[in-house]
Image (cartoon, helix red, strand yellow):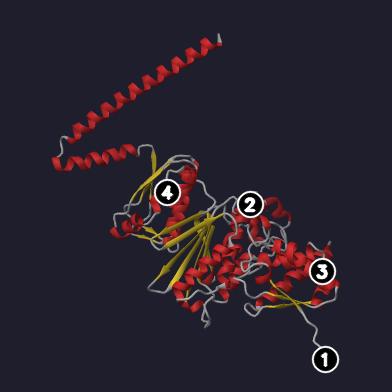
Amino acid sequence: MNKRKSKCLLKRIELSKIRKKVKRSKKYNTWRKYRNRNINKLKKENRAVEIKRLNIKDKHKHFVTVKAPRNCLVNENTEEYIEFINKIENVLSCRKKVFLQMKDIENIDYGSIVILLSTLIKFKENGIDFNGQLPKDNKLKEIMINSNFFKHLKNKKTDEIIQDKYNISIDGIKTHSGKTVDSVLSARIIENISKKIWGTKRELKSVQRILIELMHNTNNHAAIGATGTQHWWLSTKYMEQENKVCFAFLDLGVGIFENLNQKIDKKTKMLFKDIFSDIFIKNRNNEILEGIMKRQFQKTSTNQPFRGKGLPSIAKVVERKKVSNLLIITNDVIGKVSDDKYLSLKGSFKGTYVYWEVGVNNDKRIKKSI
Amino acid sequence: MTKELKKVFNIAKEFSKYPGPRYKEEGSYSGQELREDFLLNVVENSIMGKKQLLIDLDGTRGYGTSFLEEVFGGLIRENNIDLEEFKKYITFKSDEEDYLIEDIEEYMDDANNENSKK
């Protein structure tokens, strides 16, 4: 009896598939007639362009379009750019396909490219399709095309979809990624960038310290309740005219304050009101970040007093002028550490982004090469 | 008059030029690995044998704060090394980053204070 039932069921499924196929082809044929009727009204020269446009539109019918801001500059146009990234993240959380409308971009900095790249890698890791339109501006188009940006993302080999480490070179921008603290990699990166700036390899222990601290923080705190699960991304670009190297470090975890909030809930804050000062209770995150950088708060999200020294040590590196223009963007705060300014953002960035520069003036020692 | 020969433990030569994270599971060349597998024996022998030991911090590519805290704060916190005895027989050398010694002393003092509270 069971064999007969299953045979009947299979037949029914096959029939419904055939019916759906016929229906789809009928639908397609009606659409094609409509399209051709409108195209035949156009001049011959314009017909091919119109067909292409309609085909693209139809191909991306099930994609959610997200338009990029004109100035994709995460350092200068932070609010707008974060809003753009958050929209992409929202599409990802709904497990829908995304189409990036980038044709009207006028400016893009490499920190923004790295954030975009690491966001799109998440789509790839989740097996969700994405696509986009290149900028109209030829210079920007060239940067995107000549790089391996889209090439890398288009790679369909399943073995390469989810990796622990990435090494990508984009038009002079070198990007590395990992999940653990890789002190050997950071030392190699420093050797390479110092060669660009000073002509010889140098040890930059302060920069090494910053990199170790940031990788450590990502490993320990980027995910709630788990360690070593989130990627960190480190990107460097040599700016030849200014003879300096720009660093962009990024993780797309929960961000510093989301992490703190998860571990220190409201009840605990109210119970220990004296210890957690007023700013913790009112969630003035920009003041909290300032306090953390200046070592005004000893406790950390781990509640272990011997920890929480990473961010203050980064602030000390800035104080000693071993790096320049250091800024941190996390959740709803932008901390311009070099300028001693800590500001609130209207939007919220899910993750932690740190940017800094190293130039000739950051290491004035006359030293032999290593 | 003969000078007492100090034993020297150079972290870059005896362990690694690339000190890494705090714990072993976080990456290679961790502070936990240095403390448990290399330094603890050397420190204990120095204290028990009443011999001077110099820990040389130079020659590496740079230290993270968590690494240093785990090594030296950890000796006090996890291995219950007596801080006074440690200071009697063990000294530091750091010509490349002179502020490291002050930081390490702070970590060890904090670890000692935490232990005394328990």
- Label 1 Cα neighbours within 10 Å, binned few <14 / some 14-19 / many ≥20: few
Q: Quadrant of the N terminus of chain B?
A: bottom right
Q: Are marks 4 and 2 on the same chain?
A: yes
Please give the name of the residue rendered at 52% of the width and 75% of the height, measured from the top-left corner. A202
Mark 4 in CB contact with mark 2 (< 8 angstroms): no
Considering depth in this image, is B76 or B57 the residue closer to the camera? B57
Mark 3 lies on residue: B44
SS at circle 4: helix
Q: Element type at marker 1? A: loop
- Residue A301 lies in quadrant: bottom right
| Residue hosting label 4 | A153
The residue that disc 2 covers is A227
Answer whether residue A103 is visible to the viewer in this image. yes
Q: Where residue B1 is drawn, which disc sits there? A: 1
Q: At label 4, which amino acid type do we have?
A: Leu
Q: How many marks?
A: 4
Q: Chain of mark 2?
A: A
Q: Nearer the viewer, mark 4 or mark 2?
A: 4
Return the x and y of residue A353 as percentages of the image width and height. Answer: 51, 60
> What's the CA distance linking mark 4 and mark 3?
54 Å
